[in-house]
Image (cartoon, rainbow, N blue to C red):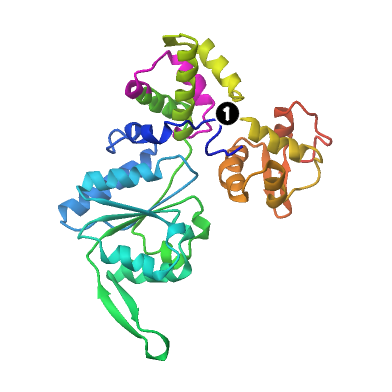
Amino acid sequence: MNRETEPYAHADDSALEGKLRPSSLDDFVGQGKVKKQLQVLLQAAEQQQRVPDHLLFSGPPGLGKTTLAMIVAKETGRSLRVTSGPTIQHAGDLAAILSSLEYGEILFIDEIHRVSRAAEEMLYLAMEDFRVDVMVGKGPGATSVPLDLERFTLVGATTRAGMLPNPLRDRFGFTASMEFYDKDELVQVLQRTGRVLNVKLDLESLKLIAQSSRGTPRVANRLLRRIRDYAQVQNVESIDAKTTSEALEIYEIDSSGLDRLDRQYLSALSENQSRALGLGTLATRLGEEPETVEMVVEPYLIRLGLIERTPKGRLITNSGLLSLGIESESSSLFD
């Protein structure tokens, strides 16, 4: 099961994403400190009539990094150019993008930690001096030709800030670490989504969905859409807590937000409570990519205190065992 598509995804999800994204900082729910800092930065740039500093957003998937990049473009009245780290594997790929940017344009690089080393080194000069050195010719006769760039703002997003080299991180004028949302913030997100989709839910339903959303707006919105689908099939006009609970049970999501993949992960660790399992072993057992397990599954389980990462691998905690209804072999093992 692919966590990015099941059980939350749906065929029309991508078409709805644009409608559900807030278009201004005022409409953006959560990340209060980041919003205030970003507002100051953008207002100062406008008053000083200059291009805003380069921005870096880091944090787990689904917390609003891409949305904030889009909002920055809209708030500054600039166009947005979107690309991703995996697509920039050669310096020439990046040079082609940079040389085509207009003054003040916003360049958004998602998964910026996956940019190739050659392109990364080109970024250093582009971000700092707004120029790149392009190699002309091959072999001993090749020469480096400087190419001036229009001033632009780079917005980077990463789920793995630790993989960014210091020289690249230091060139961002503003860095923000996105935090998981609390229940009240997710209720606000769901209320807005309900209005956009014209879905009627009572407050208890909103709280149940928020509680099951892993602290992540993207998951909350997807769950709401799946519950809307269930209510429609059941001919329910106004969604209440009973309908919401029934839908969550069908999608195998419990009140803590744990789904089948989480329980499979925990079960794998529980088979030998005292032995740590490596990421590769767990990924193979689950039939998932290691990066999906590490960046999508594990952060929430760690946040709930259900697992621990150790130098030898992953271990399940007493709380993790209790979530499966299993008694610990040693109650003092994780005390």
Q: Residue 129, how many percent across, how many down?
A: 28, 71
Which residue is found at the position 25% from the left and 63% from the top?
100
> Mark 1, residues whose alpha carbon is within 10 Å: few (<14), some, or many (≥20)?
many
Amino acid type, mark 1: Gly
Residue 2 vertical position relative to residue 208 in the rendered view, above or below: below
The answer to whether 149 appears left or right of 323 in the picture is: left
Is residue 65 in sight in this rendering? yes
Instruction: Give the camera-side residue of 159 and 235.
Output: 235
Is residue 335 in sight in this rendering? no
Instruction: Give the camera-side residue of 27 and 235.
Output: 235
Residue 258 vertical position relative to residue 33 in the rendered view, above or below: above
The answer to whether 52 appears left or right of 274 in the picture is: left
- Image quadrant holding the N terminus, namely top right
The answer to whether 246 appears left or right of 127 in the picture is: right
| Quadrant of residue 206 within the rendered picture | top left
> Magenta stretch?
194-217
| Quadrant of residue 304 within the rendered picture | top right
Q: Residue 247, how many percent across, how many down?
A: 55, 18
* Residue 76 is covered by the magenta coloring: no
Which residue is found at the position 36% from the left and 65% from the top?
94
Residue 29 vertical position relative to residue 157 in the rendered view, above or below: above
Q: Residue 226, how many percent across, how many down?
A: 49, 23
The answer to whether 283 appears left or right of 38 in the picture is: right
Which residue is found at the position 26% from the left and 48% from the top?
73
Q: What residue is shown with label 1?
A: 257
- Image quadrant holding the C terminus, namely top right
